[in-house]
């Protein structure tokens, strides 16, 4: 049975841990609000930009933009957006489990975040580049990544570029998602329906300056830049949300453990005091 000194040391140690996890929870919560707002605010703009790109493509009859060209998939690049630090629950585990499903022979990785780079190195997969971004990256920061993959796609070094990141659903739920950014194509839920206002865009009398292809030539790369930037924002919102929930759970568990240790400490003290009283009473009876 542990003595009271050992239990006091354990209580002190768990209290110190609880203070650390509580502080991390508060920091993650403050970052989470800003990251969630950025991710949610950017979604309508990114969705409309993608739809506009696909709609304008229908106006360039006889011409195909190089970034819209679909080719047989012989080589693929996956932009893996993970976290720099751990302590965020199963966020990275779920993401890397999906990354492991890509064909090792035909897939190269571009990583964002140290956890992703470490996984690529451990699994001995091909790493083309590793980008380190700030905690709150700007559009200019992520544009370096998208320009790199655009150059690879235009040079026909790869036939498809996929972004694998974590989509923010809510504070408690974050799901891994893979989105093809090159060639630009609609998401499954973006299939144009007959009643959709975007369905007859190509039939409208729209005038472009200087011409639809030149407009598309500016719009398509920007759409790729925004897709990568949006994926990074979603990943950051997911990371801070998962870390806040994980640290809150750790803090609550630490408090529960402190309560149990305190109860055990009091029981041992009570038993010790009772034993001493019995010994004193026995000694008095023997003397008497």
Image (tube, rainbow, N blue to C red):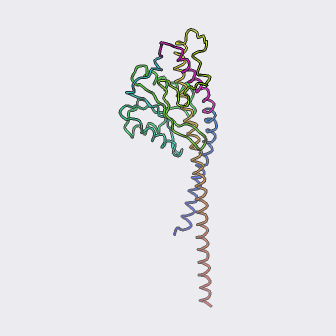
Q: Residue at x 59, y 41 (%)?
A: 241
The quadrant holding residue 117 is top left
In the rendered image of this protein, does residue 273 appear above or below residue 130?
Answer: below
In the rendered image of this protein, does residue 110 appear above or below residue 263?
Answer: above
Q: Is residue 52 magenta?
A: yes
**Residue 231 spot, x, y in % from top left:** 54, 31
In the rendered image of this protein, does residue 264 appear above or below residue 42?
Answer: below
**Residue 190 spot, x, y in % from top left:** 56, 28
Residue that lies at the very extreme toward the left in this rendered image = 105
In front here: 47 or 107?
Answer: 47
The quadrant holding residue 124 is top left
In front here: 203 or 22?
Answer: 203
**Residue 35 spot, x, y in % from top left:** 61, 35
Q: Residue at x 62, y 84 (%)?
A: 281
Tell me: 153 left or right of 43.
left
If the image is split into quadrants, where does the C terminus sit? bottom right
Tell me: 241 left or right of 125.
right
**Residue 32 spot, x, y in % from top left:** 61, 39
Q: Residue at x 49, y 36 (%)?
A: 113
Q: How many labels, in total?
A: 0
Residue that lies at the very extreme toward the top in this rendered image = 210
In the rendered image of this protein, does residue 22 appear above or below residue 239?
Answer: below
Tell me: 159 left or right of 190.
left
Q: Which residues are magenta?
A: 39-64
Mostly what secondary structure, the magenta segment? helix
């Amino acid at each position: 049975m542990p003595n009271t000194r050992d239990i006091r040391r354990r209580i002190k140690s768990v209290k110190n841990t609880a203070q650390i996890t509580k502080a991390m929870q508060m920091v993650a919560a403050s970052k989470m609000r800003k990251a969630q707002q950025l991710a949610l605010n950017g979604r309508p703009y990114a969705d409309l930009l993608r739809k506009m790109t696909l709609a304008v493509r229908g106006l360039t009859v006889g011409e195909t933009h190089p970034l819209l060209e679909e080719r047989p998939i012989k080589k693929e690049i996956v932009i893996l957006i993970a976290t720099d630090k751990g302590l965020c629950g199963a966020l990275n585990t779920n993401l890397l489990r999906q990354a492991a499903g890509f064909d090792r022979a035909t897939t190269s990785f571009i990583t964002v975040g140290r956890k992703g780079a470490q996984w690529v190195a451990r699994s001995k997969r091909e790493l083309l580049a590793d980008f380190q971004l700030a905690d709150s990256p700007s559009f200019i920061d992520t544009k370096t990544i998208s320009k790199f993959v655009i150059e690879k796609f235009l040079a026909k070094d790869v036939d498809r570029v996929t972004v694998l990141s974590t989509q923010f659903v809510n504070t408690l739920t974050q799901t891994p998602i893979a989105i093809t950014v090159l060639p630009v194509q609609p998401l499954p839920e973006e299939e144009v329906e007959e009643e959709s206002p975007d369905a007859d865009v190509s039939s409208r009398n729209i005038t472009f300056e200087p011409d639809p292809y030149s407009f598309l030539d500016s719009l398509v790369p920007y759409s790729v830049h925004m897709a990568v930037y949006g994926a990074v924002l979603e990943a950051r919102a997911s990371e801070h949300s998962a870390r806040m929930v994980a640290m809150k759970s750790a803090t609550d568990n630490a408090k529960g453990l402190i309560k149990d240790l305190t109860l055990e400490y009091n029981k041992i003290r009570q038993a010790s005091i009772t034993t001493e009283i019995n010994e004193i009473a026995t000694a008095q009876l023997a003397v008497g």
